[in-house]
Amino acid sequence: MQNLAILGATGSIGASTIDVVERHPDKFRVVALSAHSQTGRIVELARRLKPLYLALPGAPQAREVRAALARDSLRTEVLEGAAGLEQIARAPEVDCVMSAIVGAAGLPPTLAAARSGKKILLANKESLVLAGGLLMAEVAAHGAVLLPIDSEHNAVFQCMPAQGSRVGGASGVRRILLTASGGPFRTTPVSELAGVTPDQACAHPNWNMGRKISVDSATMMNKGLEVIEAHWLFDAPAECIDVLIHPQSVVHSMVEYLDGSVLAQLGTPDMRTPIAYALAWPQRMDAGVNMLDLAAKGCLTFERPDHERFPCLALAYAALHAGGTAPAVLNAANEVAVAAFLRGELGFMGIHDTVEETLQRSTIRAADCLDTVFAADRAARDTAHALLAAART
Ligand code: NAD
Ligand code: MG
């Protein structure tokens, strides 16, 4: 029996995780959940899953949830704020932490889980983008196990010769090929991109995801963040990580070997597959997913990304080359710009421009401690907000 904490339980990955876990009550027990805004939903989940702990963002939400649970005479302990999230990630009753908060807020509890030697199922790619070096060092130092949930990295993990394999050296691995769907605007005329709406950007052709990552898929910043994520997970230099557009989202990524072999992981686009893989690893279990019908698919296609259409991809490679706090700056500026786009305050192409300008104005330092990383994150957010405010006047 594995005792599981789900950070970001009310989100898209959180819901898929609960779906998989509820199919296997003999293997998993949910002992902790966190939510940021949907208190009604977390109360409903607490009644169903009866966890030992809940983490809410602050005192008002915690009071509301405690009052609701008192009526059910549930004994769940309700924790508050960032400290509550870290407490859950460290709790002795927890074996395995699903890190599925969106954005930089996911980093501190993920680090806490690493320092407590937990098995970490990592959906929150921002943790690696912000502080990949620090997180991987903590995982190694404390004997934690880090399994990627992001479908591409989960696919690469499945195609690698062994756990812990890296690109180059004795592994025989030459390159990582990350696939990308190209999002909803793959064939939209570039001249029309400036006018697209948040709802159009969130209407992903193959995946049903949270709104932030959906916009990132439409700009391909998501793939850029994933290049940085792959760099840390598989110790791969930027020039050994390539991106291929594959609109059908059936091949989730590939690993190229020295002898010319290319291994791929295929499946129906459904996040329950990588979640079930990581939960059951090194075994396999049913994920409730429709099996892949290749004959019905008929044809799988691949093309190179168009950098004029997707300029964010090159920004992410540049940030990876620059190193230090540059990826944290990239991520922070992107979070601010995407939120402004979703509020209708910034045009779609303005996301790239805001991130590029923020990177140019930022001082890049060595990412040698968490304080430096968060200082860079805060400064980049201030710069991006100032740029957006200046554009409005
Ligand atoms: P989502 O927006 O659906 O859910 C996010 C969750 O995080 C919610 O539970 C929310 O309450 C919580 N949250 C939001 N802001 C928070 C904050 N400041 N502090 C604490 N909790 C907060 O997002 P999602 O699509 O489930 O994505 C979650 C993570 O997984 C992201 O890092 C995303 O990049 C990654 N991911 C998602 C998918 C997918 O298919 N949805 C695929 C690959 C990777
Ligand atoms: Mg992905």
Image (tube, grey):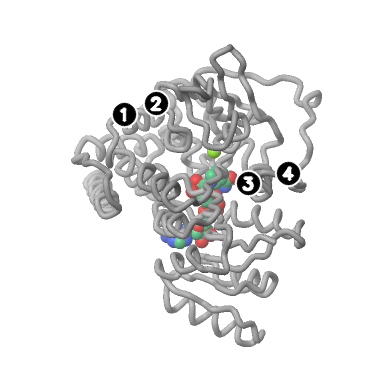
Q: CA distance from mark 2 to mark 4?
A: 31 Å
- Tell me the kind of residue under disc 2: Ala
Residue at the disc numbered 4? 284
- CA–CA distance in space, label 4 to label 3: 9 Å
x, y percentage for residue 182?
Answer: 54, 29
Residue shown at 49% from the left, 35% from the top: 218
Disc nearer the start of the sequence (3/1):
3
Q: Earlier in the sequence, mark 1 or mark 4?
A: 4
Picture quarter containing residue 155? top right
Question: Considering the numbered disc 1 on the image, is that residue within a helix, a strand or a loop?
Answer: helix
| Whether residue 210 is visible | no
Q: In the rendered structure, are the residues bearing label 2 and label 1 in contact, judged by CB atoms less than 8 Å apart? A: yes
Whether residue 90 sits left or right of residue 264 in the image: it is left
Amino acid type assigned to the residue bearing label 3 in the image: Ala
Q: Which residue is mark 1?
A: 321
Amino acid identity at mark 4 = Arg
Q: Position of residue 118 (x, y in %)?
A: 52, 56
Q: Nearer the viewer, residue 105 or 354?
A: 105
> Residue type at mark 1?
His
Q: Is residue 145 visible?
A: yes
The vertical placement of 6 against 281, above or below, is below
Dot 4: element: loop
Callout 3 crowding tier (Cα within 10 Å): few <14, some 14–19, many ≥20: many
> Which residue has dot 3 on it?
278
